[in-house]
Image (cartoon, rainbow, N blue to C red):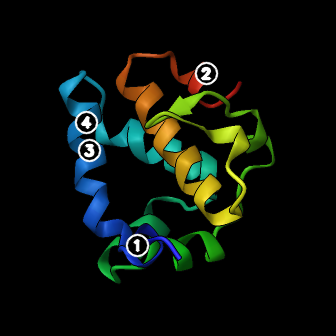
Amino acid sequence: MSRIFTTSVAAVYPHYVNKVAKKGRSRAELDRVIEWLTGFDEAALTRHLADETTFEDFFAAATVNPNASLITGSICGIRVEEVEDPLMQKIRYLDKLVDELAKGKPMDKVLRG
């Protein structure tokens, strides 16, 4: 089992915020991307962050967007569509979406609109 599975989302979330902020994107845009992927609205995301929910429990509680399979490409040298472990793939989907947001991709393309 990967160490990231038992890491709290709250421990990584500030890094996501910093990454997108450095490129001129907002926390609200980040939260919108997370909501698109997981189904968690602002209140639910805030609750998961406050409760220090692990990635494993976070994605177990999530309703992953049916269009998540449209997320393709590499993140950290790994093609997200080829990740075999379902939980790791969801984490990589999130990483890829955050990366695309930080790179300035239009929101409708990030959200596979």
**What residue lies at 48% left-to-right and 33% top-to-bottom?**
77
Q: Quadrant of residue 48?
A: bottom left
Residue that numbered label 1 is attached to: 3
Mark 3 to mark 4 CA distance (whole Å): 6 Å
Q: Earlier in the sequence, mark 3 or mark 1?
A: 1
**What residue lies at 36% left-to-right and 41% top-to-bottom?**
28
Q: Position of residue 104 (x, y in %)?
A: 39, 16
Residue that numbered label 3 is attached to: 17
Mark 3 to mark 1 CA distance (whole Å): 21 Å
Q: Earlier in the sequence, mark 4 or mark 2?
A: 4
**What residue lies at 57% left-to-right and 27% top-to-bottom?**
110
Question: Which amino acid does the dot numbered 2 rest on?
Answer: Asp
Near mark 3 (Cα within 10 A), the count class, few <14, some 14-19 or many ≥20, is: some
Q: Earlier in the sequence, mark 2 or mark 1?
A: 1
Residue that numbered label 2 is attached to: 108
Near mark 4 (Cα within 10 A), the count class, few <14, some 14-19 or many ≥20, is: some
Residue that numbered label 4 is attached to: 19
Question: Which amino acid does the dot numbered 3 rest on?
Answer: Val
Farthest-out residue, bottom: 51
Viewer-side label of 4, 1: 1
Mark 2 to mark 1 CA distance (whole Å): 32 Å
Q: Going by the image, does 109 lie left or right of 65?
A: left
Q: Position of residue 12 (x, y in %)?
A: 30, 59
Question: Which amino acid does the dot numbered 1 rest on?
Answer: Arg
Q: Secondary structure at mark 1?
A: helix
Question: Which amino acid does the dot numbered 4 rest on?
Answer: Lys
Q: Secondary structure at mark 2?
A: helix
Mark 4 to mark 2 CA distance (whole Å): 19 Å
Q: Going by the image, does 109 lie left or right of 14?
A: right
Viewer-side label of 2, 1: 1
